Amino acid sequence: MIDKQTNSDNFELATINSRIIAFIIDDMLITFIILAIFWDTIVNNGSDLTTVLILMNKFVFQVLVLKFVYQTFFVWYYGATLGKIVAKIRVIDYDDFSKISLIQSALRSFGRILSEMFFYIGFIFAFFNEGKQTFHDKISKTLVVNA
């Protein structure tokens, strides 16, 4: 059972609002990076919305790889993505409240991508458990707490 304050370290679980803010910041950052990388391709093929969407679908694998690497590296190395840093939250190990391993971070990132691909259903898990854990938090055994 997870209380709002967890044992001796007194971690406070991150609010859903702070997690949403971090998510929006991270997605905007990834979008800007993708636009910067493929800017020439977008401009040379027309800049109407339909053309941009077709090009994004063409590069969906590259977008997923970028998201995976971004989420995995930052959460493993810093304990938080840039969005989480701005929102003042971080990811910790569920069992001992320590920094998570690279494997946990990669598993969490993969689960997050799956959640996004399936209509964000995995994110809804956070509303229905005491630890506010999403699907990707559950499978990687992590918690998101205030920094």
Image (cartoon, helix red, strand yellow):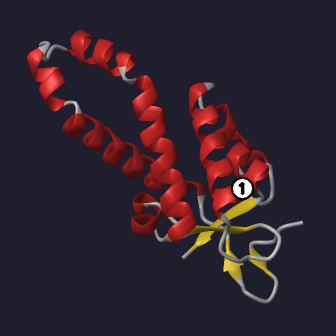
**Residue 20 appearing in the image:** no
According to the picture, the residue beneath numbered tag 1 turns out to be 132
- Locate residue 122: give its quadrant: top right
Estimate the x, y position of residue 142 in percent, counting from the top left: 72, 61
Kindly tell me whether residue 51 is visible in this rendering: yes
Q: Which of the image's four quarters has the N terminus?
A: bottom right
Please name the residue shown 14% across and 13% down the image.
Answer: 45
Picture coordinates of residue 81 (x, y %)? 46, 60
Q: Can you give x and y, in whole percent of width and height, for residue 107 in the image?
A: 68, 49
At x 42%, y 41%, the residue is: 66
89 or 43: nearer the viewer = 43
Residue at (63%, 69%) from the top-left corner? 145
Q: Quadrant of the C terminus?
A: bottom right
In the image, taking residue 16 as reference, residue 59 lies left or right, namely left
Amino acid identity at mark 1: Lys
34 horizontally vs 99: left or right: left
User: In the picture, residue 55 is in which quadrant?
Assistant: top left
The answer to whether 123 is drawn above or below residue 61 in the figure is: below
Quarter residue 21 falls in = bottom left
Q: Is residue 81 above or below residue 7?
A: above
The answer to whether residue 50 is left or right of residue 120 is left
- Residue depicted at 58% across the width and 37% down the height: 113
- Residue 46 drawn above or below residue 115: above
| Crowd band around label 1 with a 10 angstrom C-alpha radius: few (<14), some (14–19), many (20+) | many
